[in-house]
Amino acid sequence: MSSPETISAPRWPNKPVDPAVAWVDYDVPADEFLVYFEGKPTRAISSPLDAPGFEDVAVMFGLNADGEATDEIVGVQVIPMLLGAVQERPEWAVLAWAALAGEYGVELLQERLPGFLEDVADAVSRYWTPAPTMEAQLASLGSASRTGLAANQVKTA
């Protein structure tokens, strides 16, 4: 399975996501809020959205038949939701409640989900960058540990 590091430009859906079609769930033990745009969970890989106010948000890229990440964003994941993201965006708390409320939350999701998704889409367009390759991540860990080692040697000398 490939990761989103090979994606150069993510594709948000061309048309607005219909809250009546989207699959929305809030998992209490995991404190995870999920939205799949096309009505059911699909094979996907998450890519964190490193944007101000969106540190706990990831976009989900669809996977093709070979398990390779596509450039199509198929959903959004927020984890932790209530213990994390809601601290900066209190208006998102109602989304978790609406997802848990079943049929009682449908109207609220139809009202609030579009604004949430517009905010995420805007953050994606302004801030999303591909994750560094695994090799680059390992190299940065190696250089950080060497730097730390050198600093410790200077302190003890």
Image (spheres, rainbow, N blue to C red):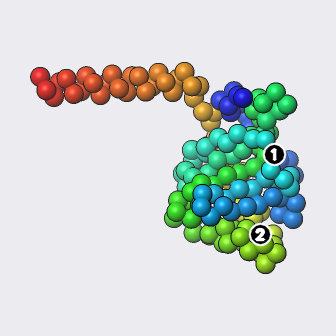
Which element is circle 2 on? helix
Say if 137 sits above or below 106 in the image: above
- 54 sits to left or right of 113: left
Q: Pinpoint residue 136: horizontal percent, then vertical percent.
A: 52, 23
Q: Position of residue 120 (x, y in %)?
A: 68, 53
Q: Nearer the viewer, mark 1 or mark 2?
A: 1
Say whether residue 70 is visible. Answer: no
Which residue is at a point 61% across and 43% down the rendered structure image?
48
Q: Nearer the viewer, residue 107 or 11?
A: 107
Query: Label 2 belongs to which residue?
Result: 109
Report if residue 129 is visible in the image. Answer: yes
Where is residue 66, by image quadrant?
top right
For the residue pair 117 and 32, the one nearer the viewer reads as: 32
Q: Residue type at mark 1?
A: Thr
Which residue shows up at 69% across the image and 68% down it? 95
Q: Determine whether 100 is above or below 71 in the image.
A: below
Question: Which quadrant of the structure image shows residue 135?
Answer: top right
Instruction: Kindly identify the residue that appears in the image at 65 percent across and 40 percent down.
Output: 47
The 10 Å Cα crowd at callout 2, few under 14, some 14 to 19, many 20 or more, is many
Q: Residue furthest bottom?
A: 104
Residue 124: percent from left, percent from top? 67, 46
For the residues labelled 1 and 2, the Cα–Cα distance comes to 21 Å
Circle 1 residue: 42
In the rendered structure, find residue 74 and report the number of the disc placed on it. none
Left-right relation of 130 to 105: left
